[in-house]
Every structure is written in structure tokens, then in C-alpha cells.
Amino acid sequence: MGKEVAKLTLPGKEPIDLPVMKGTLGPDVIDIGALSKLDLFTYDPGFRSTASCESKITFIDGNKGLLLHRGYAIEQLAEQSDFLEVCYLLLFGELPTQSQKDKFVIKVKNHTMIHEQLIRFYSGFRRDAHPMAIMCGVVGALSAFYHDSLDIHNEEHREICAFRLIAKMPTLAAMCYKYSIGHPFVTPLNKMGYAENFLHMMFSVPSEELIPNPVLVRAMDRIFILHADHEQNASTSTVRLAGSSGANPFACIAAGIAALWGPAHGGANEAVLAMLQEIGNVANIPKYIAKAKDKDDNFRLMGFGHRVYKNFDPRATVMRKTCYEVLDELGVHDDPLFAIALKLEEIALKDPYFIEKKLYPNVDFYSGIILKAIGIPTNMFTVIFAIARTVGWIAHWNEMISSPDLSINRPRQLYTGPIIRDFVDVKKR
Ligand code: SDX
């Protein structure tokens, strides 16, 4: 069968044949490359109907609530795998053998420490600086430590970048928290697992070594898995766009952290907690549901809705289950915020507005409740998201840089500004 084409007919022009491309899963795409030669652009603010690239890493089906990482369903990975194994899968495309996994874990552990001169950057921030502001700064600063020796077209160099970023993010993140409370930084302990080491760096003090609760460690590791990657979301697209110019990968990841910070994206988990605290008790829920539906009120139910998921976010389902486990383990069955969250979800899912607009709880709706129960402060929630998403960002960056079709991403526009006009001297204005 010949190649499929989409025919574009414009007034006064010959019909244009545009090739239709098929993936292994998901919608077909129309290759519009030919339009640039005809001085024509497509127009799609927010990229609702735009495939920006070809990728083999993650697939999402918004109607079926499906999320696959290299073909493996997120539910199975969350239940049966661990975060570093998912990192290996996202980076290299296959689940590792035991020996591959052991070698990968050792390589990550060899990069958990931070250069002493980078540690000094923290003292330049106010103690009450938002940790995401600090993370933008210190991760960007990594590009000053790893630049001259870095050739992004060398596969080994790209691989060590991945190890450095995956390994250092928990250390840098925990340092943000310790700095905010005036505690000394805690050095990573490589005898610990990834999530265990993070909780150790967050909550250990020199006077008392902490052995993190294994149930909380498992919950933390699962939260990392659930946030690891998500196709071409805003922050991943930011990393790809920055990386397409050949910029230093550490600087590109810092750009991704900046994009993730927004409340419409990764900042939503922090905003969910603030919203639940503002609602205060179950009796106030109808008032906030009404605000969310009021066109004249820009209040939105944080943790609800998604650009792609129009049925349910499979990560939210796993997150809710993990919530029950953690609150059970900690004996906080009557956590008031969890009670409000469960009731809010129940009421919203029955409300015609939410049903019609296909608004369901997303990954951020429950994660904050678990993180708060673990003892992580609200302003660190998006930092946790950034730790996890770093592997997704670097996997997509690596896929783009190693592609033979690599070219700088440079979109065009619909211009509606003034037409050409002559300059007028200030005396005559
Ligand atoms: C993440 O892209 C990703 O994959 C992101 C992410 C990842 O892993 O990378 O999944 C992580 O960012 C999850 C989303 C976290 N954000 C929030 O929870 C913030 C609250 N949600 C919304 O801001 C919103 O739902 C978005 C930003 C998530 C999606 O916005 P869209 O796709 O642009 O949808 P929209 O804003 O056009 O909304 C469609 C309609 C609108 O009403 P109408 O103009 O059609 O009348 O639904 C309404 C919106 O007003 N709506 C909501 C709502 N979300 C959308 N109304 C009330 N509460 C909400 N949460």
C-alpha cells in the first residue's frame, strides 16, 4: 500500500499532499514540513495538536489512562520495580539483567557527592529562599563544573552526565532543606539505597544517625517511579528546546526545573496542599467546587485535570493506594487533609462540570499528602518531582542529541503587530 497522504486545499492554490506518518502506538501524525517551502505555517498555541518529535521512551493514552515506559505499564513498574531500575529502562530502553543493574547502581553511587566549591553556593541564598529557586541555581551551576571536558556528541560523555545528574539531585535537594532549617548538610551514605539515602540526607543529624522506615522508603521510591517521565510535557519540552541549540546539558536540566516549578505543572503538588489547607474541612468543599466552576473566578481545583488524561491518571490510582499504606504505617488514619482529599475527589467525580470537562485527579493530587506524612515540607514537594523527572529529562535530551535528525528547534509565529513604518524623530512625535 502506497504511503498515506493528507490533502490540504487552500484558496487559489494547488492541493498539497502531506505525508501521514504512523507510530507503533497512538494517533497518526501529519508531516507538515513541506509547508515552510510554501511560506505557510500551522498555528497551534499550547501545542494541543502538535507532535514536536519522534520518541521511543514513553507512551501515554489519555483516553485509556495508559502510561508505558519503553512498553512497560506504570502500574507494573510501580509495584514490581524500583526507581534506579526504571532509570536504566528509560535511559537504555530495556530492563537490566541483575549484573547490569548492579553495575548501574554502583555507577550512580559513585557520583552522589557534591564539589566543595558548589556547596558554597548555598550560603549565598537567604535561608527562606524557595528550594526550587535554589535548585535552578545550583543545578545550573553544575554546568560550570562540567563544561570544558564535555563533548555532548560523545556517547560516554552523555552517559556520565546522566549518572551525575541522577546521583546528585537527591543530595542537592536534601541540602536545600537542611540549609532552610540551619542544619549541617548530611553526606550521602552509599551503603543505602537511592530513596533511603535521600530520606537519610533529609532527616539525619550528626548527633543521631537515622535509619529510615522501610515503608516510607518504599513509598518514596514509588513516588520517584511515578514522576520519572511523561512524554513531551512542558518541562521535558523545555529541556529538548534548550538542548537543541547544543547547550550544556546541566544548564538544560536547570531550564527544565524552572519550567516544572509552575503551578500548572510540577508546582501543582505544593498548590494541592495549600488548597486542602485553605478548604480546611469537608463542610467547605461545595463552596470550593462552586469556585472552580465559576468562570469569573480563576480558582482551579489543583491536582485535577490534565492536558492528555481525559479519563484517569494511572499514577493517581497508584498514588492513592500508597497514601493508604503510608498513613496506615504511620497510624495517621484520621489525617484531616486526606479526609478532605478523598471527599473532594468523591464529590468532584460526580459533578457534571468535572465529568463534562473530563477533570480527574492527576499525579499531583495525592502525592503531597504522602510527602507531608513522611515529614517533607510543602515547599520541597516540587523539588521531589524534579529529582524524579531528571531521568526523564536526560533520557529525552540524550535521545534528541543522538538523533541523526538533530536540528535547532525554532518555531515560527502568526504576526499581528504593526506593518512597516518609518522612524519619527522625538521632536516630531
Ligand atoms: C502535571 O503534561 C504533563 O504530562 C504534566 C504532568 C507530568 O507528569 O509532566 O502530568 C504533571 O503537570 C500534572 C498537572 C498538574 N496541574 C494541576 O493540577 C493544575 C490544575 N489543572 C489545570 O491547571 C489544568 O487542568 C491543566 C493545566 C493540568 C491542563 O490544562 P489544559 O489541558 O490547558 O486544559 P484547559 O485549561 O484548557 O481546561 C479545559 C477546561 C477549561 O474550561 P473551559 O475554558 O473549557 O470552560 O477545564 C477547566 C478549564 O477552565 N479546568 C478546570 C481545571 N482544569 C481545567 N476547572 C477547574 N479545576 C481544574 N483543575
Image (cartoon, rainbow, N blue to C red):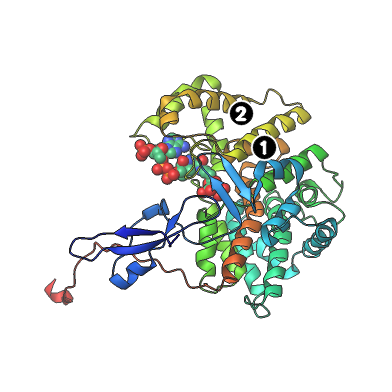
Q: Please say if 51 is above or below 145.
A: above
Residue lying furthest top in this view?
A: 283
Which class describes the residues within 10 Å of circle 1: few (<14), some (14-19), or many (20+)?
A: some
Which class describes the residues within 10 Å of circle 2: few (<14), some (14-19), or many (20+)?
A: many
Amino acid carrying mark 1 in the image:
Lys
The spot of residue 81 in percent (x, y) is: 75, 46
Query: What residue did someone put label 2 on?
Result: 337
Residue lying furthest front in this view?
A: 1
Q: Are marks 1 and 2 in contact (CB under 8 Å)?
A: yes
Residue at position x 66%, y 52% in the image: 388
Image quadrant in which you'd find residue 166: bottom right
Left or right, 192 with reference to 328:
right
Q: Please say if 199 is above or below 404.
A: above
| Residue 358 appearing in the image | yes
Where's the C terminus, which quadrant? bottom left
Query: What residue did someone put label 1 on?
Result: 372
Between residue 52 and residue 415, name the one nearer to us: 52
Q: Secondary structure at mark 2?
A: helix
Marks 1 and 2 sit apart, C-alpha to C-alpha, by: 10 Å
Residue 186 numbered tag: none
The spot of residue 137 in percent (x, y) is: 60, 63
